[in-house]
Amino acid sequence: MNVTLRGHTQHFRTVAFDAAENSVLLIEQRLLPHEFKIVATPNFRATAAAITDMVVRGAGAIGATAAYGLAQGALDFRGRDLKKFSAHVEAVYQVLKNARPTAVDPVNAMNDVRRHMSPGQTVAERQFLALAAVEEFAREDVRHCEAIGRHGAKLIRNGMKILTHCNAGWLAFVDIGTATAPLYAAQVQGKKFHVFCDETRPRSQGATLTAWELAQQKISHQIIADNAAGHLMQRGEIDLVIVGGDRTLGRTGEVANKIGTYTKAVLAARHNIPFYVAIPLSTIDWNLKRGFDIPIEERHESEVLGAWGMISNPKSEIRNPRLVRRAYVRIANPTSGAVNPGFDVTPGELITGIITPLGIFKPQELWLRRHELGFELQ
């Protein structure tokens, strides 16, 4: 995506790799929308920490980051013993796999890399194949998002008001995004529409990330409080809902996505508003049989009890408007605790359709068309 900073526009990918330094390059998403910064993780443990700490987040982006981290770890190995190399790669795999448990993209991405590495007859060959496989995974992620955009743009008509939740945009993938891909494609087609961005508490990815993306892209939008969506639906102010997904069960069509997605799906069903989920094929889990088996990440209570933002000293601001710092502010009662599930699961019957790179499918169609959708590759 193109980013304009201080009047200069440049194309960036959310995740990239510096082969010369064997480091993964990431946009530091915790600083957005106030500061745009690229950070480099020097080793696979730092890469895993970046996933856990949400320097990078979003299904496709953490999938690509984990895959790059696996190649990074493989390239760190010194020696020629294939057995020791395989043990090292397995250790790297486990560290990255456990960085965030709910999304399936990191596991699918790393499994793909390991499959492509296996024909190598030497450590050097496997290291080369690992990096080549990751670069192809990143390119495929972009192609998938472009295809999602082409299929999803057909759902958007002039004058529509569209609701998004969390950030399934360019920042959540290598480029373009999933839930935003139809928006970007429709914009290119000249369609005029308006987007409501759920703030998406507790981390406010809608207010900070999706809104920033849409502003960069000059798409008409407004941020709403999460609890305002029902009111707008009741008043006929929302025509379509498009969200992303962190894990979609191929057997049932159930979708795990950012907490609050299920609530929006129930509201959309109540008001007869189409509710779509946009995903790449790497987000499909063909193994789990029911949504209750999806591991739901429990994040730290501080996310609910307060919020991060950018603050500045008023006196300093006069001298230098950029002299600001990131700070955490406690909002809740000081003696109270909180429960903070990061995701919820939306049943297939509440989903109008799932937008994939191969077209739009009903949730129950995924298993029927599993071979077309990549089941044989699992």
Image (cartoon, rainbow, N blue to C red):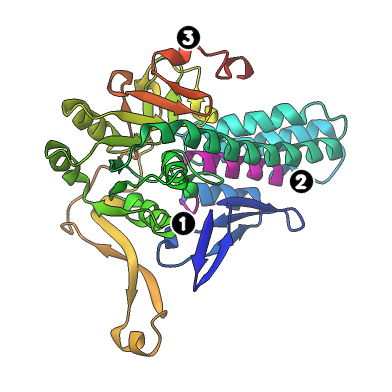
Q: Residue furthest top?
A: 368
Q: Is residue 143 magenta?
A: no
**Which residue, given by chain and number where applicable, does mark 3 sit on?**
368
Closer to the eye: label 3 or 2: 3
Residue stretch rendered in magenta on the structure: 54-72
For this rendering, which residue is in front, 260 or 349?
349
Q: Amino acid at mark 1?
A: Gln
Q: Residues within 10 Å of mark 1 (few under 14, many from 20)?
A: many
Name the quadrant of the C terminus: top right
Give me the residue at 59% from left, 50% from top.
Answer: 15
For the residue labelled by badge 2, is the local secondary structure a helix, a strand or a loop? helix
For this rendering, which residue is in front, 367 or 181?
181
Q: Is residue 59 magenta?
A: yes
Q: Amino acid at mark 2?
A: Leu
Separation of marks 3 and 2 at Cα, in angstroms: 40 Å
**Which residue, given by chain and number where applicable, does mark 2 sit on?**
75
Say if 281 sits above or below 330 in the image: above
Measuring from the top left, give residue 174's x and y in whole percent. 56, 45
User: Is mark 3 in CB contact (under 8 Å) with mark 2?
Assistant: no
Q: Can you see residue 95?
A: no
Q: Which mark is residue 29?
A: 1
